[in-house]
Amino acid sequence: MAFSKSFLPLLVMLLLACSGCDASVLLDDTPTAVGEKNSAPNFNSLRGYEVIDYIKARVEAACPATVSCADILALAARHSVSVLRGPRWQVLLGRRDARTAASQFEAGANLPPAGMEVPGLIGIFASKGLDAKDMVALSGAHTIGETRCGVYRSRIYNDNNVDPNFAAIRKNNCPPFGDDNKWTPLDLQTPTRFDNKYYRNLLGGRGILHSDQALYSGGSVDSLVKLYSANNSAFFADFALAMTKMGNISPLTGANGEIRLNCRKTN
């Protein structure tokens, strides 16, 4: 399995998990329970599930019913950043897995849409115990991975704070109509390297999502974007701290939850 490429979506998967770090986002729908995996923000966007399946199978073969899917996901997220030359951080272990997925309504309510402005972004992150600095640092995860034409079309055709040359390049891969599911890198310069190019792009009006560019639009977090664009070490340090905080959001421990044998379904 080509991990170097497949790791890219894993960090985003962890960032989007809306019920806390309990691997609920990995659960497939069942005839009686429709969860967050196919909610509107996640449908055709979250990928990389097969990487977790592969890791879980190897772990179960070596150490059955011991390591949760939630811990595997947290560790894979760290490794996906590290292998792309990003920072490392301590991952506390001992999480257990949720027995139910968050509802599609919950997923939609907790995941920031691509058209959101800074106050809304701050509010969503604050609801999880994360502050504005955490939000800006974690947004830097968009230095890797891909997005779909249907998600960023409005940005390149309608926004007035987009670099025209950048928009022209992006329009080559995203027509005004159709091709909604056509993928493109979030960062065209270094799409498989975890670095601070994301913030440099924002300074030049080259954020691919409206919610990305909103971070540098004359608002309250402009100074953080400037800091991270000029200081990669500061970005790495704050990203690692924010990931540590996020990894401790509402974990299931002790007798709560379970250790799933298959990350896609409960025991």
Image (cartoon, rainbow, N blue to C red):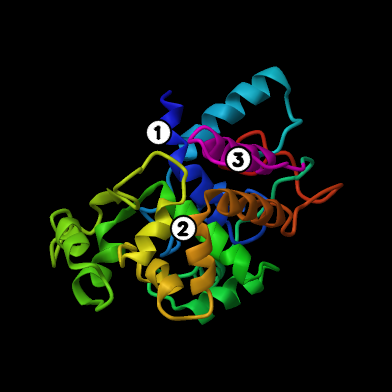
Residue at x 38% of width, y 74% of height: 115
Residue at x 35% of width, y 43% of height: 190
Q: Amino acid at mark 1?
A: Lys
Q: Is residue 86 shown in magenta?
A: yes
The residue under label 3 is 78
Q: Which mark is residue 5?
A: 1
As drawn, the residue found furthest toward the front would be 230
**Does residue 170 appear left or right of residue 61 in this picture?**
left
Q: Toward the viewer: 184 or 237? A: 237
Q: Nearer the viewer, mark 2 or mark 1?
A: 2
Of the image marks 3 and 2, the number of the one nearer the N terminus: 3
Residue at x 48% of width, y 56% of height: 230
Residue at x 46% of width, y 46% of height: 195
Q: Position of residue 246 (x, y in %)?
A: 67, 56
State the SS at label 3: helix
Magenta segment:
70-92
Q: Is residue 40 visible?
A: yes
**Taking 39 as reference, is 122 above or below it?**
below
Q: Amino acid at mark 3?
A: Arg
Q: Tell me, yes or no, whether the two marked residues, 1 and 3, touch with CB atoms within 8 Å.
A: no
The residue under label 2 is 229
Q: Quadrant of residue 262?
A: top right
Q: Residues within 10 Å of mark 3 (few under 14, many from 20)?
A: many
Q: Position of residue 238 (x, y in %)?
A: 63, 55
